[in-house]
Every structure is written in C-alpha cells, then in structure tokens.
Amino acid sequence: MWNRIAEKVERGERLTTEEGVYLLTDAPLTEMGALADQVRRQKTDGTAVTYVIDTNPNYTNYCTVDCHFCAFYRKPGKPAADGYTHDVDGVMNMMAAADKLGATTVLLQGGLNPEIPWEFYTTIVREARKRYPHITPHFFSAPEIHQMVEVSGLSIKGVLEALYEAGQRTLPGGGAEILATRVRKRISIKKGGPDAWLDVHRAAHQVGMRSTATMMYGHVESRAEIVEHFDHIRALQDETHGFTAFVPWSYKRGNTPMEAKVPHIAGASMYFRVLAASRLYLDNFDHIQATWFSEGKKTGQIALHFGADDFGGTLFEENVHLATGHLNKTTIAEIEAIIREAGYAPAQRDTEYHILKRGEGPEALATLSADVPLFIESLRELPAEYPSQLEGEEPGDKLVMPK
Ligand code: SF4
C-alpha cells in the first residue's frame, strides 16, 4: 500500500479514503514524513518557515454550549468570580495591547453568550479596523457566527456580509474539532453536525473572506473519522478555494469534563502522522501549520520536517488551553531561533500568509545572542475533579475510541 501511495503522490493523484486511513494507522512514519516534506517543498518556499505575530484574547468566557472538552467557559446565569464579558472599550484595550506588542493579527474569540447584542460584533470589527488598520481582525469562530444568527435574525450569509462590510476579511477555523457526526454528538452535541461548521466557512468564502481549517484530535475519534474530516475540508476547498491553511492540534485534557473518560493522550508520533497525512491527503491546501504552542517547542520544531511550512503565531495571550493547565510562552526571537535551528529562514507573514519580512537563515544562529531563551518548557498543573456523568450522556456511557 505504501509504494502505491508514494507513486500516486509523485504523479499528483488524489488519495482515497482507504489510503488516508492507512496513512493514519500503518504507513511507515519516517518515509511518510519525508514524502510530505518533499510535497511541502514543491508547493511552498522550501527554504523558509513562516510565522505570524499574533495574540488570542477573548471577549467573554460565558457560554451556553457545554462542550465536554472545554475548560474555558462559565455558564451564563451562574455568575462566576472569574466570569467576564468585555464591552467595546474592553476589546479596544485588548487591541491597544496587541498593537504595543507589534501584533499584525488579533484572533479574538469568545463563548456563546446570549446576552451580547448583535451590534457588539460589528462594532468591534469596525472600530478595530478604524483604530488599528495595520492589524487584521481575525475574529469569531463558526459557533460564534451561529450565535450572531440567533441574536440578529439574519442568515449565516447575512451575518458574514455585515462583518465583511465592517471590515472583516478572515475567519479563524475554531469549532471544527472532528467533522464527523458521531464525534460531535459525543463531545459537543449543541454545536450540530459537520454542516454547522462547513456552512459557515462556505458562506465566508462566498462573501470574500479567507479562513483556516482546524482539527482537534486525540479524544474519541477513530482514524476513519479523521479522514472523514479531511474529506469534508478537501471537498469544500475544491468548491471555494477559500482556506489558507490546515491547523491541527491535540486535545488537552486538564480540567475538562471528559478528561477522566479519554484513556489515552495523543503523543508526538501521532502529531507527526496527522501532519504528514494532511500534507499528502489535502492536496488542495497550500499551507499546513505546525505548532510550538500546543504540542511543545521541540515537537513543533521536528514537525517542520513532516510537511508543515508554517509555525503558527506568537500567541502573546491565550486563555483556552491555559484553562486546561497547558501553559506555553515564547518570544519572536525564540521562534526565529527554533526555525533556524530546524534549517530554515524565518519569514514573518500576515493572516493571509503573505510574507511581510524574511529573516536570515540558519547561518545566523551562530551569531545570535546567547540569551535567546530556547526551549522554555511547558508547565501543566494537575486538574481538580471530574464529573462521572456528562450532560447529554446516559448512565454507564463510556467515551471510548472505536477500533
Ligand atoms: S469550546 Fe467554545 S463553544 Fe464549546 S463550551 Fe468552550 S467556549 Fe463554548
């Protein structure tokens, strides 16, 4: 099977579902990484790895959706000491802080909070554009767009047209998790099936926005369901060509309702496999993102040899993974050093993957200051308690990975 796949990739032929499952299960990992790296070099600048200067603040942590993998949200109607909802000024303060740090992208998301009026969303886009024209407002994941549909009475397309008119040009890919009905029923039943996410991204592309396709794996999905996810986004990319990149990361268990029910944490090998498989399977995507943030700096660095051409963002602020006890910080100097050590020139990009500035290549590593703090390790606090039964679950139900 491996030889057949390698020959098909060499000929530029599309891989089948069965071949996708093989890549995620039995294909030889290092050979697959080498082939993915070869494809990445044909599609993108093989001498550079891109990154973006960004930050991920949040406007509210109140949310009605109760995703079983989420440690970030607080329930509306149950005021929590650490619950918050920022107004327009509060969001503009976040934009000012991002501006001070040199960010070119602000990825702003929040919980689904029914108390927030429709006007809030368009106003923060319009004000952000007016006050910080050099920063891209990369705001609102697909579930938040559905929340706006609820409060505005508009269609999905109507909401996105209004956001576009206010100045929004890109949409982050959050909320996809695994685009397979069974999985979404088990971990985020209130978000609807795969179409709930796909319909938003299709409409976003139709109104002229670009977006990313994300995937959170390593919980209750099967390998076939990961391929189903790939199939959905590959088909939509054929239809609209609106995705800039594919961005996978693994589920972080700490403090989340389903932690005790997921028996196995996806490790680095699975991450490399997912990245390489996505590079080979998603033949209509230009960019595949590796992440220092979610998988750790050393894993993220090696991932640059498994088909990824982008190292994600600086993420100066991040609260969703932090709520699980996953803390990871970096600096621009450190990101550039990690990329150079992997053998590439760091290139700063914007939200739509245009190169803004290209740095010196690996040779510059020798002359860098000794105080570039390479590899500050992630910290993770131990979680507290977990419910034995989750919302929407029958007594005795188990979240187990199907064979
Ligand atoms: S993942 Fe998003 S939609 Fe789900 S509970 Fe958390 S904040 Fe709400």
Image: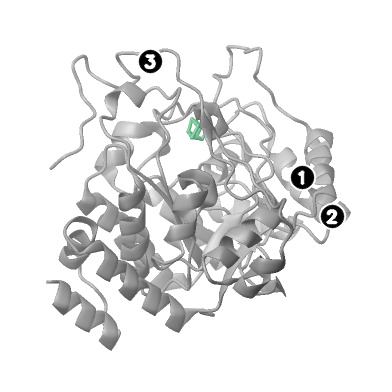
Image coordinates for residue 103, horizontal then vertical, percent: 75, 54
Residue under numbered circle 2 = 132
Q: Nearer the viewer, residue 163 or 362?
A: 362
| Cα–Cα span, label 3 and label 1 | 36 Å
Q: Earlier in the sequence, mark 2 or mark 1?
A: 1
Residue 273 picture quarter? bottom left
Name the residue: 20% across, 21% down: 397
Which amino acid, mark 2? Tyr
Q: Secondary structure at mark 1?
A: helix
Q: Is residue 36 above or below residue 402?
A: below
Q: Nearer the viewer, mark 3 or mark 1?
A: 3
Name the residue: 22% across, 78% down: 6
Q: Is residue 131 above or below residue 45?
A: above
Which amino acid, mark 1? Ile
Residue under numbered circle 1 = 124
- CB within 8 Å, label 2 to label 1: no
Image coordinates for residue 135, horizontal then vertical, percent: 77, 57
- In the visual, does 180 lie left or right of 43? left
Q: Residues within 10 Å of mark 1 (few under 14, many from 20)?
A: many
Residue under numbered circle 3 = 386
| Cα–Cα span, label 2 and label 1 | 11 Å
Q: Secondary structure at mark 2?
A: loop
- Does the numbered disc 1 mark a residue whose Cβ is under 8 Å from ligand 1? no
| Cα–Cα span, label 2 and label 3 | 42 Å
Q: Secondary structure at mark 3?
A: loop
Residue farthest to the bottom, as pictured: 11
- Return the mark for residue 165: none
Name the residue: 59% across, 14% down: 77
Q: Quadrant of the N terminus?
A: bottom left
Q: Is residue 292 visible?
A: yes
Q: Nearer the viewer, mark 2 or mark 3?
A: 3
Which amino acid, mark 3? Tyr
